[in-house]
Amino acid sequence: MSFERMERLRAVGLMSGTSLDGLDLCYAHFYRTSNGWRTEGMITKEVTYNSYWQSRLNNAFHLEKKELEALHIAFGQFLGEQTKLFLQENNLEKKTDLIASHGHTVFHEPNKGITVQIGDANAIIEHVGLPVVNDFRSLDVSLGGQGAPLVPIGDQKLFGNYAACLNLGGISNISFQLEGKRIAFDISPCNLPLNVLMRKHYQLEYDKNGDLAKSGVI
């Protein structure tokens, strides 16, 4: 069935961000209304990366091709294991239509047409036995886009009544309507340098609730 003819969809989304804090899982029930798409019944979980996965993902950029391919499969197995556990914990095995997995970005130079995310979808299917949608950025980049924010069409379908959607992750990016088209692009580093400063000066992984930032003077 094509997306335009769908009325409801139940999905689990997987996201591993550039901040390397962990794997985010989110179950959501999407449904169409006369005013566009809406969500309900969201369930979320964060799986904090241990030192092993932090190190492997952080160093993926420097791997040779065969080593990167091996990590691609191993990380896919990890994603599959965590997704299966998430489904079991929340009794969602028979309430989920598909898994949407972004994977983890290793290379992203859209101006050169390059973007690589690891996390083998076949390994996820092996564990959960459900359809998996992945490789979100490649087509956008091949058509001249920046592949970020990740799903501008989702911003448009779910939050079209807002002037823009701003994402503040490891990298900040934005999407908005301009002359009938959805425009999207990266803006600048965001949490990545902040996390580096926290580790260097405070021996913390991140500034929880922005408490240290709020204690400063602009």
Image: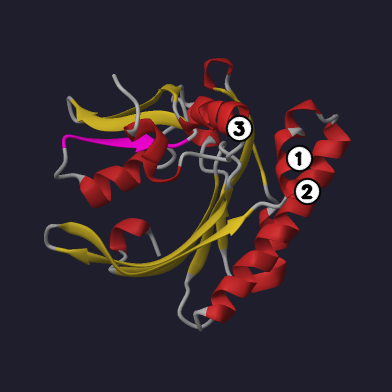
The reply to whether callout 2 and callout 1 are in contact (CB within 8 Å) is: yes
Q: Where is residue 205 in the image (x, y as percent from the top left)?
A: 58, 40
Residue to which mark 2 is pinned: 52
Q: Position of residue 210 (x, y in %)?
A: 38, 39
Could one spot residue 163 in this view of the protein?
yes
Which residue is rendered at x = 53% and y = 63% of the image? 99
Gap in angstroms between the C-alphas marked 3 and 2:
18 Å
**34 relative to 152, above or below:** below
Q: Is mark 3 on a helix, strand or loop?
A: helix
Q: Where is residue 150 in the image (x, y as percent from the top left)?
A: 44, 39
Task: Find out whether residue 139 is within the magenta segment.
Answer: no
The N terminus, quarter of image: bottom left
The part of the chain drawn in magenta is 163-169
Residue to which mark 1 is pinned: 55
The C terminus, quarter of image: top left
Q: In which quarter of the image is residue 11?
A: bottom left
Residue to which mark 3 is pinned: 199
Q: Which of marks 2 and 3 precedes in the sequence? A: 2
